Image (cartoon, rainbow, N blue to C red):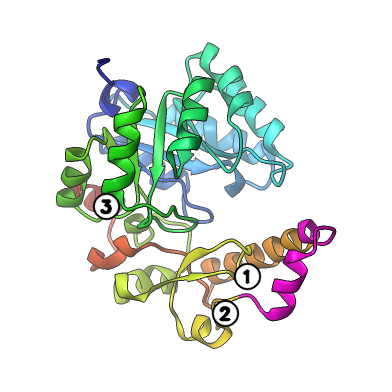
Amino acid sequence: MTTKSSLKDLLGITHPVIMAPMFLVSNVAMLKAGMESGIAACVPALNYRTIPELEEAIKELKAAKVPGGAFGINLIVNKSNVKFPDQLDTLCKLGVDFVITSLGSPRKVIDKCKPLGIKVFCDVTDLAYAQKVEELGCDALVAVNNQAGGHRGNLSPEDLIKELDANCAIPVITAGGVADKADLDKAMSYGAIGASIGSPFIASEEASVSQEYKQACVDYGAKDIVMTQKISGTPCTVINTPYVQKIGTKQTWIESVLNKNKKLKKWVKMIRFAKGMNDTRKAAEGATYKTVWVAGPSIEKTTAILPVKEIIKGFI
């Protein structure tokens, strides 16, 4: 039986925590604060509209890196991300500590990053996909469970961690449902080497979202998280605001019919995704009556808007 590396050893960090990459939320200031507190932190490449902006962010993070901290980039690796090739070239050219891949095959990322010493972690929601990415050579699995924010998995944290840990030779990092140190300790008792934690950091002083979004994470709790198909057509967790209640969470009958048409399905999904992301961006970045705020159940224990370093103390 092989001994699996700890998250601390894999990334050279002090505490077994990754600040999860969050669309629109994550930024350089958050990642810097995370590294300074001894954790790893990750930002989606798609948070930067241009490659020069991504380059600037990576250079700033490299300059700010301190012992005990690490930073990475999250890449959407399927065809919907037309910027993927340039994003991958950029982070390989400049150098990052790790990459988290989502929504597609990580083969190209693994082939390019591993020879450079860049760790590759892959989002997975089930054993079948986990075994595929393990065979490709990824360094760890990010086990996205049914308590995660955004696009989540179907299995509970305990069931998913235990299944992956028992059947895969590489380490498992849990993603979803970790709101404090007790939750982190529980996940590690199931076999996880650490946790990728996102939603509790939305209500941070450094986050790049509106005060209304941050305050919503304080005011609402786990019971207020609902699944909606209105953003991308794929179920996604959001806070059940009055606006979400008004528009509903299900596809309309027209959308449902179009999504079943093989010739139109691809285009309908692309249009829905583009519109949903635009609505989400507007809601996240400013006060608007269209409050579609993505979050997970772990906002349950968010009681105030705090600096990142104070939020991290709750996990360590």
Image x and y of residue 306, in percent: 27, 60
Using residue 284 as the reference point, say whether residue 173 is left or right of it.
left
Residue neighbourhood size for the residue with mark 1, other residues' Cα within 10 Å, grouped as few (<14), some (14–19), many (≥20) = some
In this view, the residue farthest toward the right is 263
Tally of marks: 3
Q: Which residues are magenta?
A: 251-267
Could you say which disc has been placed on residue 290 in the image? Answer: 2
- Looking at the picture, which amino acid does disc 1 mark? Asp
Image x and y of residue 278, in percent: 66, 65
Residue neighbourhood size for the residue with mark 3, other residues' Cα within 10 Å, grouped as few (<14), some (14–19), many (≥20) = many
Q: Name which of mark 3 and mark 1 comes first in the sequence.
A: 3
- Looking at the picture, which amino acid does disc 3 mark? Val
Choose mark 3 or mark 1, whichever is in front: 3
The reply to whether callout 1 and callout 2 are in contact (CB within 8 Å) is yes
Q: Residue at x 46, y 40 (%)?
A: 124
- Give the CA distance from mark 1 to mark 2: 7 Å
- Residue 161 is covered by the magenta coloring: no
Q: Name which of mark 1 and mark 2 comes first in the sequence.
A: 1
Choose mark 2 or mark 3, whichever is in front: 3
Q: Is residue 229 visible?
A: yes
Could you say which disc has been placed on residue 279 in the image? Answer: 1
**Could you tell me which quadrant the C terminus lies in?**
top left
Q: Residue at x 30, y 32 (%)?
A: 165
Q: Is residue 316 visible?
A: no
Using residue 284 as the reference point, say whether residue 157 is left or right of it.
left
Q: Name which of mark 2 and mark 3 comes first in the sequence.
A: 3
Q: Is residue 285 above or below residue 13?
A: below
- Residue 264 is covered by the magenta coloring: yes
Could you say which disc has been placed on residue 313 in the image? Answer: none
Could you say which disc has been placed on residue 178 in the image? Answer: 3
